[in-house]
Image (cartoon, rainbow, N blue to C red):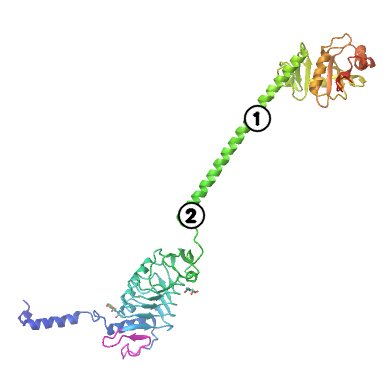
Amino acid sequence: MAPGLRFPPAFALLHLAVTLLAVLPRHVVPDLAGDRDALLALRAAVGNHLKWDQSVSPCQGWQGVSCSPSPNQRVVELRLVAKSLSGQIPVGTVGNLTALQTLSLRFNAISGPIPADIGGCTQLRWLYLKGNRFEGDIPESFFSLALLKKTDLSENRLTGGVSSEFNKLRNLATLNLEGNNLNGALPSGLDLPKLTQFNVSYNGQIDGPVPASLPGLPASAFLGTALCGGPLAACPNSDSEAHKSRKLTLGVIVGIIIAALVVLIIILSICVLIFSRRRRAAAGRSTEAAADVHEGTEPITVTVAMTGRDAVKRSHSPPGSPLIGDGKKLVFLGSAPERPYDLETMLRASAEVLGKGVHGTTYRATLDGGEPVLAIKRLRDVHLPEREFRDRVVALGALRHDNLPGLRAYFYSKEEKLLVFDFVGAGSLSSLLHGSSFDHTHLSFAFFRPRVHGRHV
Ligand SMILES: *[C@@H]1O[C@H](CO)[C@@H](O)[C@H](O)[C@H]1NC(C)=O
Ligand SMILES: *[C@@H]1O[C@H](CO)[C@@H](O)[C@H](O)[C@H]1NC(C)=O
């Protein structure tokens, strides 16, 4: 057992107290001596040139230092404005000035972060760090400085966002953050009931809307930022709204495209319908025309030959053929010839002029192979509508007369009208077709002159 047990109890207690005092750190209870050490450490870090007389108390004339009154004197103010301070403020210096109410280090060249133990200055009310080179985030402990009234951190190089933890500083009336590199949105619920001055100007990366909880601030509080709303220009649609409107726009575009397609399909359908109807109608008309021909010309049948090779084949097609009414055609009266020919064949045939008459020129044409031999009358100045022309040709074809060669076919187009006869001996044909006698018989080609006042001219 320890010999101390033999001491009387009172002596033992005293011994314990003395021992405790000896082992406890000197600054467990903060005092002016601790403030002094903190100040000297600060000076060593950022302002060796400061002339602080260490032979006296900091409260006795150290430049920029103010103390609370005796007996429990503490350093309550440190103002070192524009004192060419430079370097970083270490922890355990300013943070040890636990009675400090005012810290002003404006317009120096202090760099590095705001000391992480700034929260140790629990009595701090006025904090001015403007115009230095403080960098990095505002330290977490800063937001425990619940008594802060004015905070000016402007014109530094602070980064990070404007934390909603500012809301912990319920007494804050002035918050100057302008001229830093802060970024992001201002907390939408920023709620500082005593705030009268607020400035985040010239933090180019601060964006988003001005919180509605910061009413009545001038636009000059938000210069040089990407903020919007409030005193500034209205915000574009918020993200979700923008997304919605983009979606809407896309929807509208898709709608327009679909509508356009539907309209196009409808138009195409209508076109197809109209086209097919017209074709049907045309086919109907052709049939009608063919029927007409049939009706009016019995017992004569009419066969049509188109120009071209295919047309020769078609010339065999029955009168109902839709080819009737088409452009160039050779219309046969009666049965088609044994060796069918068409206009082209006819025009290619070797021909000689038989004679010229008042109503046109007559040719003798020998088709390829020598058979048949035709007489072709090319009518001049005959201006009859096709239907009437046809009627008259049919009427003429129906006539049987010894002196009249058989009328085999005719051709009608706007420019050209041809009558095709069997060739019956040069003499008679010549006299018949272009001789004066022919012209003045009742079989005259005056037949083909237009009717005037209902009679033949
Ligand atoms: C600041 O306070 C801490 C803890 O009380 C102490 O350890 C440190 O030495 C103090 N700093 C100075 C410079 O005295
Ligand atoms: C905010 O700070 C900028 C830059 O210093 C200044 O121009 C502006 O007037 C200030 N606005 C307010 C409301 O303090």
Find disc 2 in the rendering and name its residue. 242
Mark 2, Cα crowd under 10 Å, few <14 / some 14-19 / many 20+, is few
The picture places residue 64, in percent across and down from the top left corner, at 38, 86
Kind of element beneath mark 1 = helix
Q: Is residue 55 left or right of residue 411?
A: left
Quadrant of the image where one finds ligand 1: bottom left
Residue stretch rendered in magenta on the structure = 52-74
> Is any atom of residue 158 visible in this view?
yes
Tell whether 314 sits left or right of 225: right
Q: What residue is rendered at 44% in x and 66% in y?
A: 183
Question: What residue appears at the point 39 percent right and 86 percent down from the top-left corner?
Answer: 50
Residue 244 coordinates in the image, percent (x, y): 47, 51
How far across and down, in percent of the image, does residue 259 sit?
56, 41
Cα distance, mark 2 to mark 1? 49 Å
Q: Residue at x 24, y 80 (%)?
A: 29
Which secondary structure dominates the residues rendered in magenta?
loop
| Residue 324: quadrant of the picture | top right
